[in-house]
Image: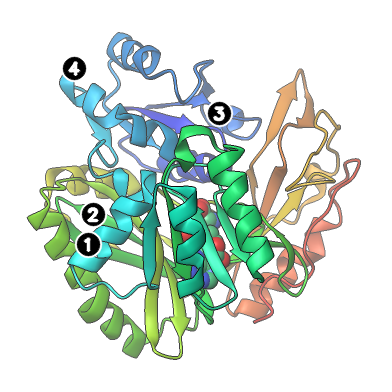
Amino acid sequence: MKVLVVGSGGREHALCWKIVQSKRVSKVFCAPGNGGTEDISENIDIDVDEIDKLVDFALKESIDITIVGPEGPLVKGIVDKFKAKGLRIFGANKKAAQLEGSKVFAKKFMEKYNIPTARYRVYRDIDEATQGLEEFDYPVVIKADGLCFGKGVIICNTREEGLAALKHIMVDKAFGSQGNTIIIEEYLVGTEASLLCFVSQGKLFPMESAKDYKRILDGDKGDNTGGVGCFSPNPLIDEDMKRIIQKGILKNIERGLEYEYLDYSGILFIGLMFTQRGPKVLEFNCRFGDPETEVLLPRLERDIIDIFQKTIDGNLREEDLRWSEKHCVTVVATSKGYPGRYEIGKEIQGLDNMDRDIILFHNGTKRVGNRLYTNGGRVLSLTALGDTLEDARNKVYENINKIKFDGIYYRKDIGEI
Ligand code: AMP
Ligand code: GLY
């Protein structure tokens, strides 16, 4: 089989890494890929948003199955376009991808189908939104409706910050038309967890749980990032909690997917907050998480192509997913300045000295000849499996200091719960 993976991050490297382990696969392409995917697949110089070019490529190469990493092309309808040409593709279609592409769509879905979430109001007008602020306590959360490269959620501690956030989104148009509509939302106190599910024609199959670290500094301080460390399993989601989530959240999502005719096969990533009043949904993504994928796929003990095929055909079963008992930890090495402005093009050294049981996923690297350079804010995800969380964590930290590039930074407390 020939497989095309769309994307260029650590998530896509982890996907390629797992896909090449399938006996059914003869060739993997990654568009556009990175310095890590280049080692195990063929990078194709087509960007993730160039959907027509991707369709042409898949037709020309007779690709058997395409896997989409990032949300952008899903929201733009890549799945619909591939299917219209008779091409097989794994991911949410355009209608279903609104669960990630529009926060208003997602919140209305949650409200309609009794999925526990933060109280919210929707506004299209700055004056009404300013008045609406009065109905909420502080901190309050203000969100732009559309995709904003992870920057569209602003947590405001005071009324002044709230007013500034409204101006930023609705008057200054910091996110363009993605911020024409906004949500003001109750701030939830608790601990976050990521639960990714395969969606096999509307039926949800949860993967193992994961804990993502979103803040750049130790102790969960500093700015929000795309995620700079992760581990799995997450002890917060024990068997009892799994039952609560199944009954109170997953069943209702399945009902909503059916009643709204959101017939997709792909991934639903549920961002959860464990509050004193039980688990609540913060957000939906319709794609694999990054860095969640880097800790989930090393624990998956089944052929992922088989899972993708069955998911698309709507006949995935629970026994098709088998997970290792081991714990997995990943720590992301980032460029100086990330998640703000950062420089790229720094030479990376020391990767040959890793212990054998380290799995190295590249987030943002570029190979030039036989040298490797940084090419993003998140650069490398050092990953290890271990019998315990501590064991996995120690393996990563014993190796990460061997990596050298100008301005390298990583959190020192990943996996310390
Ligand atoms: P979202 O894209 O909606 O997940 O928001 C990004 C991040 O903002 C989440 O992972 C949380 O850390 C934070 N966040 C979003 N909504 C809320 C909320 N209602 N209460 C507290 N934190 C939130
Ligand atoms: N790590 C969070 C995300 O992929 O959105």
Q: Do the residues labelled 1 and 4 touch (CB within 8 Å)?
A: no
Query: Image quadrant of residue 415?
Result: bottom right
Of the numbered discs in the image, which one, if any, rests on residue 85? Answer: 4
Asked which secondary structure carries label 3, the reply is loop
Disc nearer the start of the sequence (3/2):
3
Which amino acid, by three-letter code, is at mark 3?
Gly
Disc nearer the start of the sequence (3/4):
3
Disc nearer the start of the sequence (1/4):
4
Classify mark 1: residues with Cα within 10 Å, few (<14), some (14-19) or many (20+).
Answer: many
- Residue 78, given in percent of the width and then of the height, sits at 31, 28
Disc nearer the start of the sequence (1/2):
2
Classify mark 4: residues with Cα within 10 Å, few (<14), some (14-19) or many (20+).
Answer: few
Of the numbered discs in the image, which one, if any, rests on residue 33? Answer: 3
Which mark is nearer the camera, 3 or 1? 1
Which quadrant would the C terminus be assigned to in this image? bottom right
Please report the residue visible at 8 percent of the width from the left and 56 percent of the height from the top. Answer: 259
Q: Do the residues labelled 1 and 2 touch (CB within 8 Å)?
A: yes
Please report the residue visible at 75 percent of the width from the left and 51 percent of the height from the top. Answer: 333
Q: Reply above or below: 187 against 97.
A: below
Which mark is nearer the camera, 3 or 2? 2
Between the C-alphas of marks 1 and 2, the distance is 5 Å
Provide the residue designation for mark 2. Answer: 199
Of the numbered discs in the image, which one, if any, rests on residue 204? Answer: 1
In the image, 272 versus 416, the foreground residue is 272
Between the C-alphas of marks 3 and 2, the distance is 25 Å
Q: Can residue 329 be seen in this view?
A: no
- Residue 237, given in percent of the width and then of the height, sits at 42, 81
Q: Reply above or below: 8 against 336.
A: above
